[in-house]
Amino acid sequence: ANCLNAPGADRVMIVLKTGASEIYAKLPTHLITLFRCTHHYLIFSDLPQTYADYQIHDALATVSDTYKNDHEDFEFYRKLQKYHREGQDVSKLKGDKGWNLDKWKFLPMMHESYRLASPDVDWFVYIEADTSVSWTNLLQFLGRMNPKKPLYLGAQNVVGPTTFAHGGSGFIISRAAVKKMEDRRKQMSARKYDDRWELSTSLSCCGDEVVARALMEVDVELTPSWPRLQGERVHTLDWTGKHWCTPAITWHHVTPSQVDSMWRFQNEWVKKNGWSEPYLYRDVYDGFVARHVSVNRTHWNNISKDKEFIAPAEDADENSKKAWEGFCAEACLAWNDCLQWMHEDGVCKLGKDIRLG
């Protein structure tokens, strides 16, 4: 079945947030995977541009000039615009301070996506350029929710008193929830509302935290949705009972090739199981991790970190090293919770969860 016609596909808008300095590296993979399946999508960056036939919006276009012209967070933005005007290669600015700019994109991008969305859109799904999304699991998850309720869904994180959805794990807001926020903005006047939240953003660590406070102001609280939405990769996840029987919707910090392999995994799954059965973390484990687990590997870091033993310094000769490695394996067997061990330069580490590394 065509992924554009999957149940609920016409009700979801994917909003991807990126930066001009990484677009050419990270965007293409999304365009040939997830974006082929979405009727509604928007791409926001820090530079208005056209990429092939795709329009890319400047998320910061509506931020007031007071900040854009003078605030230190916008130094990178000013440099970007200059490079763009002069026809220079903006990807050369990669290592620069794009991160400080990132937090300013969140609220403006939400106002803009609400303004541009067709009335058919029930759900706004916000992701980053290094987030991977399971289209089938996402649609099945949202199919059980009521978009007429003000819902804010994501991987819960806490900063100070605020519980917010972590941006990189992807977060989802129902039309009803966004409407409450937009009504408040209209009622106050957009400029007044934005001035207040721009000041708030300038004092906050992170844009995803600001979103939560703007929603809380209109009585929309986060519905914690971890581990369906979460911020690990296949290689760093702790494969435990906390995840095992849950559908896997998002991964974060993924490379374009990992986005692609996840997408192909999903396509195979849908071919066999259709659009109404979600795949779970255990299925991802079977597909990606299981075949690597039973073997001893050299030159490999499996991120064991629950217990650590350090060999005495005088045991530095080859035989002692071998003995110490044997001890490490034995220590893992002796500890009931141990599932993996790793030994390097006289340090033995035990892990109670499986991690691929």
Image: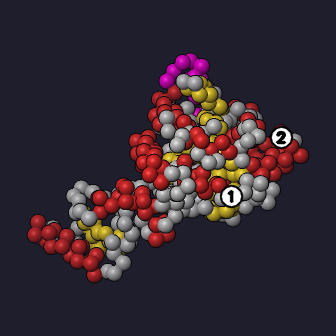
Picture coordinates of residue 6 (x, y %)?
58, 45
User: Which of the labelled discs sits on residue 190, or is there none?
Assistant: 2
Which is nearer the N-term, disc 2 or disc 1? Answer: 1
Residue 78 lies in the magenta-colored region: yes
x 40%, y 42%: residue: 257
Secondary-structure class at tag 1: loop
In which quadrant of the rendered view does residue 65 lie?
top right
Q: Is residue 225 visible?
A: yes
Q: Which of the two marks, 2 or 1, is nearer to us in this view?
A: 1
Picture coordinates of residue 84 (x, y %)?
57, 22
Picture coordinates of residue 253 (x, y %)?
47, 49
Secondary-structure class at tag 2: helix
- The boundaries of the magenta stretch are 75-89
Query: Label 2, label 1: how many angstroms apart (C-alpha)?
Result: 30 Å
User: Which of the labelled discs sits on residue 145, or is there none?
Assistant: 1
Q: Nearer the viewer, residue 30 or 330?
A: 30
In which quadrant of the rendered view does residue 264 lie?
top left
x 22%, y 63%: residue: 296
Classify 10 Å Cα crowding around label 2: few (below 14), some (14-19), many (20 and above).
some
x 16%, y 68%: residue: 321
Q: How many marks?
A: 2
Classify 10 Å Cα crowding around label 1: few (below 14), some (14-19), many (20 and above).
few
Q: Which quadrant: the C terminus?
A: bottom left
Q: Nearer the viewer, residue 275 or 11?
A: 275
Query: In the shown orientation, is residue 217 left or right of residue 282?
Result: right
Q: Nearer the viewer, residue 306 or 235?
A: 235
Picture coordinates of residue 285 (x, y %)?
39, 60
x 66%, y 59%: residue: 144
Q: Nearer the viewer, residue 159 or 3?
A: 3
Query: In the shown orientation, is residue 136 left or right of residue 58?
Result: left
Secondary structure mostly seen in magenta is helix
Residue 105 lies in the magenta-colored region: no
